[in-house]
């Protein structure tokens, strides 16, 4: 996501940038917030029918779709905005399902600690994602250490691959668990 806001503010001369002022480039994450808000409402409406455990892998797959969209389509502002919206939908579904899954899986006296630990893991995961993105950009940097088209595309590709891997793993786990139950 950090690279998703880097692309809009980078100058067009970079080969990947859209040249938006920093203020407007910051609004690129707005569709992600809208998607997350909408997904949260959808989860509340359909969670009792599909089960919260199904919404976690669905959210991960939707995030993988968004990651793939960013990887393949990031030369126009509307492509990035749409990808961010889809990412927000996936993130919102996954993040809304987690508290319900945690609350039914741990003892009541451990609920606060478990929910807090979930938040810590999300923060650490976000930090790792940013560090991986920075490492890729640094490894494939252009003159002066700046990002290149290749480093941006590779960063989005790695992100898409990781999201897809997680989505597949969660879907497989969900299928195995349903067969056992």
Image: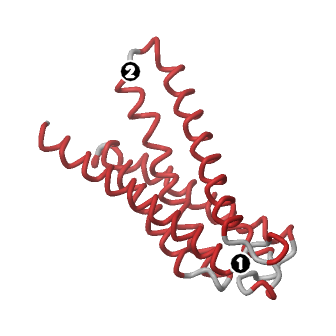
Which quarter shows the C terminus? top left
Vertical placement of residue 16 versus 151, above or below: below
| Image position, residue 112 (x, y; %) | 53, 20
Q: Nearer the viewer, mark 2 or mark 1?
A: 1
Of residue 127 and residue 28, the one placed in the foreground of this image is 127
Image position of 35 (left or right of 172): right
Q: How many residues crowd mark 1 within 10 Å: few (<14), some (14–19), many (20+)?
A: some
Of residue 37 and residue 178, the one placed in the foreground of this image is 178
Of residue 73 and residue 128, the one placed in the foreground of this image is 128
Vertical placement of residue 170 versus 65, above or below: above
Q: Residue at x 42, y 55 (%)?
A: 59
Q: How many residues crowd mark 2 within 10 Å: few (<14), some (14–19), many (20+)?
A: some
Extreme-top residue of the structure: 109
Circles 2 and 1, Cβ within 8 Å, touching? The answer is no
Q: Residue at x 56, y 41 (%)?
A: 122
Q: Which residue is mark 1?
A: 148
Question: First in sequence: mark 2 or mark 1?
Answer: 2
Q: Label 1: state its secondary structure.
A: loop
Figure label count: 2
């Amino acid at each position: 996501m950090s690279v998703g806001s880097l692309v809009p503010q980078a100058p067009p001369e970079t080969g990947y940038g859209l040249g938006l002022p920093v203020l407007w480039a910051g609004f690129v994450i707005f569709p992600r917030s809208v998607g997350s808000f909408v997904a949260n409402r959808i989860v509340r409406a359909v969670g009792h029918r599909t089960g919260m455990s199904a919404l976690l892998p669905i959210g991960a797959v939707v995030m993988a779709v968004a990651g793939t969209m960013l990887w393949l389509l990031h030369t126009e502002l509307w492509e990035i905005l749409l990808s961010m919206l889809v990412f927000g939908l996936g993130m919102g579904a996954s993040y809304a399902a987690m508290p319900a899954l945690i609350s039914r899986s741990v003892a009541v006296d451990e609920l606060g600690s478990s929910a807090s630990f979930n938040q810590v893991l999300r923060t650490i995961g976000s930090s790792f994602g940013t560090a991986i993105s920075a490492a890729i950009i640094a490894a494939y940097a252009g003159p002066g250490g700046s990002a290149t088209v290749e480093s941006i595309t590779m960063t989005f590709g790695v992100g898409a691959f990781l999201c897809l891997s997680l989505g597949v793993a969660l879907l497989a786990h969900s299928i195995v668990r349903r067969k056992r139950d």
